Amino acid sequence: MQTMDPIEATPAGGLRSPAVARNTGPILEVLRAHLPARGEVLEIAAGSGEHAVAFAGALPGLAWTPTDPSAEARASIAAWARAARLPNLREPLALDMIDPATWPQGPVQAVVCINMIHISPWAATEGLMALTGRVLAPGGLLVLYGPYREAEVPLAPSNAAFDESLKSRDPTWGLRDRDAVVTAARAEGLVLTLRTAMPANNLMLLFRRS
């Protein structure tokens, strides 16, 4: 499972991330305001599964399908799901943004991707946009959360240090330019409709399928 956060195992078998505890509330506020009341949601790179359980529990009208290419992550997601017993939380899928053979067909009303784009090669972002262009229903929503570079906004020192740390771990990782992400999305018929500043120098970017 790719993450820069310290991870600890719980007795029930799920993995716990301190970052999830910090950002779940602010992310959920945006999701409540913009996701439809009902429909199918595909979560990309769901990691430990804590977000999936929290969001599925708070948004019971949405059928939430978490995905991750990591077997370790999927085992954690399944453990949290067993404990939560939510009827709208689906089994985790082994979905890899760089392998189109693993992509589902859809349609879904929303695609949610939290903290993946900077901890993966650029090809994963291109894959995310291609997948979303394939599965997202017309008028559907792509939700991205994480840190970005922005030409018009000075890079926060903490984000600059984080970017250096990412690249030292893997030279294909790093904070992406927001405009490059917007351009990649536009190529798949996805239009940026909202940029929202979040705590700890993160952003939420919302795109609509045209």
Image (spheres, rainbow, N blue to C red):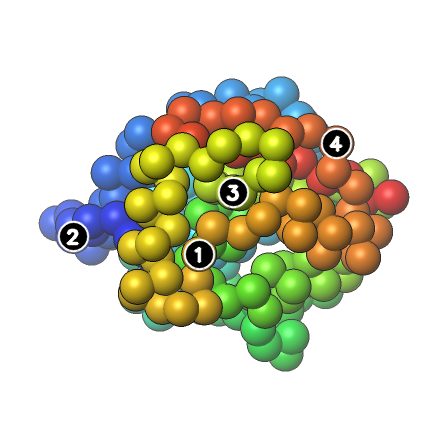
Q: Nearer the viewer, mark 3 or mark 2?
A: 3
Q: Marks 2 and 4: in contact by CB < 8 Å?
A: no
| Label 1 with label 3: CB-CB less than 8 Å | no
Amino acid of disc 3:
Tyr
Which amino acid, mark 4? Answer: Thr
Describe the element under mark 3 as helix, strand or loop.
Answer: strand
| Location of residue 12 in the rendering, given as x and y in whole percent from the top left corner | 18, 50
Q: Nearer the viewer, mark 4 or mark 3?
A: 3
Give the mark nearer the N terminus: 1 vs 3.
Answer: 3
* Visible residue check, residue 83: no
Q: Name the residue that disc number 3 marks.
A: 148
- Which quarter of the figure has residue 21? top left
Q: Earlier in the sequence, mark 2 or mark 1?
A: 2
* Residue type of the residue flagged with mark 1: Gly
Nearer to me, 127 or 107: 127
Q: Which badge, 4 or 3, comes first in the chain's sequence? A: 3
Is 98 rendered above or below residue 58?
A: below
Mark 4 vs mark 2: in front: 4
Q: What residue is pinned by disc 2?
A: 9
Q: Position of residue 42 (x, y in %)?
A: 59, 50
Measured in 3D between alpha carbons, the distance from the residue under mark 4 to the one under mark 2, in whole angstroms, is 38 Å
Query: What residue sits right under mark 1 in the picture?
Result: 174
| Callout 4 secondary element | strand
Q: Which residue is mark 4?
A: 193
Q: Are marks 2 and 1 in contact (CB under 8 Å)?
A: no
Q: Residue at x 62, y 21 (%)?
A: 33
